[in-house]
Amino acid sequence: MHTVAVVASVVVGLVFVVAGAAKVAQGAKWPAQAAQLGAPPVLAPVVPWWEIVVGALLVVQLGAPWPAIAALATLLMFTALIVRLLARGEHPPCACFGSWAAAPLGPRHVARNVVLLSLATLALFA
């Protein structure tokens, strides 16, 4: 079980690092996309760096279980945001991975987050 938990931690960590770095690479485009998603303007500049830090801590296995808890909380918030937008019939661009994810939000984004939530739950045991 420990090995599976470590692998889950590294996978979620890498996803977070890539997502954060892709947002940083977008520069001023990311806050505009975050606004389309309904994120408070004060959070938009923080989100990429939060993802990078949490992801890096998961990858290097430092501070367990707190990075896994942070990842779970973050993914729950992102998933709730996506579900809320979809329930209102809104489909803004995902922006989850910066310019790599310009597709409109849809059920696949919820499904992806459910998988990541499952992996982050496993990561608690790393």
Image: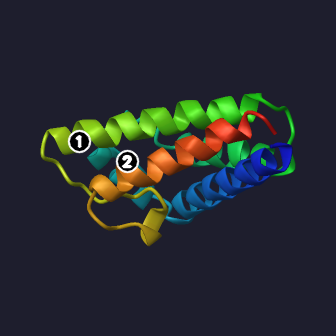
Q: Tell me if residue 94 can be seen.
A: yes
Quadrant holding the C terminus: top right
Q: Which amino acid does label 1 sit on?
A: Leu
Outermost bottom residue: 100
Q: Position of residue 26 (x, y in %)?
A: 49, 64
Q: Nearer the viewer, residue 117 or 95?
A: 117
Q: Where is residue 51 in the image (x, y as percent from the top left)?
A: 62, 46
Q: Where is residue 80 in the image (x, y as percent from the top left)?
A: 36, 34
- From the viewer's perspective, is 26 left or right of 107? right
Q: Position of residue 74 (x, y in %)?
A: 54, 35
Quadrant holding the N terminus: top right
Q: Which residue is drawn at 26% across and 62% down?
A: 104
Per the image, the residue denoted by label 1 is 85
Q: What residue type is labelled 2?
A: Ala
Q: Which of 78 and 95 is in front in this view?
A: 78
Q: Which of marks 1 and 2 is in front?
A: 1
Q: Nearer the viewer, residue 48 or 87?
A: 87
Q: Distance between the residues labelled 1 and 2?
A: 13 Å
* Badge 2 element: helix
Q: Residues within 10 Å of mark 1 (few under 14, many from 20)?
A: some
98 up-or-down from 85: above or below? below
Q: Which residue is drawn at 73% across and 33% down?
A: 124
- From the viewer's perspective, is 113 left or right of 11? left
Q: Earlier in the sequence, mark 1 or mark 2?
A: 2
* Badge 1 element: helix
Q: Residue at x 28, y 53 (%)?
A: 107
Per the image, the residue denoted by label 2 is 34
